Image: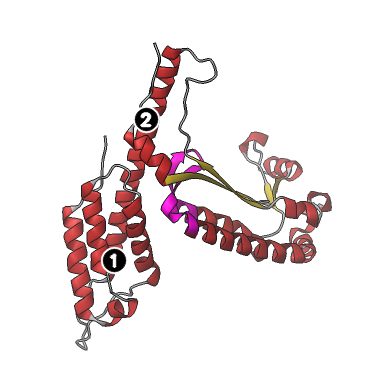
Amino acid sequence: MNFEIQKPNHLISLSSSAQLVTVEVNVWTATKQDKQISNEVTSAKNASTEAGKFTKNLLANSPDHKALLNYRQTVYNWLQRCTYDWAGSVRLLPTFYIERFMKEWSAHEVEFNKLLDNFCNKYPTIVSDSAFKQGDMFNRSEYPEVEEVRNRFRLKLFVTKVPENDFRSGGIATAIAEDLENHYNRQIEEIVNKSMEDASERLIEIASRISNACTEVTPDEDGKVKRKKVYETTISQARDICQTLKHFNLTNNQQLESARAQLEDALSGVTLEDLRESSYVRATVKDSVDDMLNKFKPLSFN
């Protein structure tokens, strides 16, 4: 008896609508535990050696080094915004967004390498400055040569297809293959549902920010209405989410599509200057967005 597997709709939809991406940002933290100083401190305080450890900041909070550490978080924050959960560090990237994703990735590579070049060029001076700041704690052997330091910083991107596993290959028994396939399909269904829950929360979050930004504060003593600032990033992120969900509604949820379309319509033809200068435009956008927020609630597949 042949064992034939019918790919569920959510798996077909996912494999044709997304890619898997992993981003690695490796950095040298430039910290080192100092056993001798740890022992001196615990001894001076009549404490057990297990009570604490002393960690040296080898570069004494160098701004150029901190810029690289901070940029690592910038890259990870960007990745979180434009992708969805898959498994562990692997993220789900909508195929619709991949061209823009690659352009933004290239820009991140350029900026990261620029910061790295700047740091490495200044490294000898930074080490000399650290020697002054660390005093008797300074140990030159704890500082790698500049080329080794450079190799400790790395920015890498891995892109793969969403797998459509066929467990019938490789000599796996039919019953086991069926169990594996069913387990895999359940996993994919959970991932799809989680992605759509996440998408609905992102849609509500950005819509709430727009509503809040369009709220006009009570007039002050001079009778002037104070307006909250509308940021360009807020509007561009809202439009990005609307465009992405137009092509990435994996469960074909009509409530999500209606909410997405209403937010898109509310911003259609509206410029940043309109929102900043026109009370009428702000009120109109806010009314439409608030109506969407009142009707649409975060998706839940539990």
The quarter of the rendered structure image containing the N terminus is top left
Mark nearer the N terminus (2 vs 1): 2
Residue 5 in percent (x, y) is at 38, 23
| Marking on residue 177 | none
Quadrant showing the C terminus: top left
Q: Amino acid at mark 1?
A: Ile
Circles 2 and 1: CB distance less than 8 Å? no
- Vertical comparison of 178 with 48: above or below: above
* Residue 267 visible somewhere in the drawing: yes
> Residue 217 in the image: x percent, y percent?
22, 75
Callout 1 secondary element: helix
- Which residue is disc 2 drawn over? 7
Which residues are the magenta region? 78-99
* Foreground of the two, 282 or 60: 282
Residue 270 % position (x, y): 28, 74
Which secondary structure lies at badge 2?
Answer: loop
Asked if residue 62 can be seen in this view, the reply is no
Which residue is tagged 1? 210
> Which image quadrant for residue 175?
top left
Q: Residues within 10 Å of mark 2 (few under 14, many from 20)?
A: some
Q: Is residue 93 magenta?
A: yes
Q: Is residue 234 left or right of residue 25?
A: left
**Residue drawn 30% across the image and 55% down it:** 203
Assess whether residue 180 is covered by the magenta stretch. Answer: no
**Quadrant of the rendered structure where residue 9 is?**
top left
Name the residue located 37 percent from the left edge and 61 percent from the top edge.
Answer: 240
| Relative depth, front residue between 257 and 112 | 257
Q: Nearer the viewer, residue 132 or 21?
A: 21
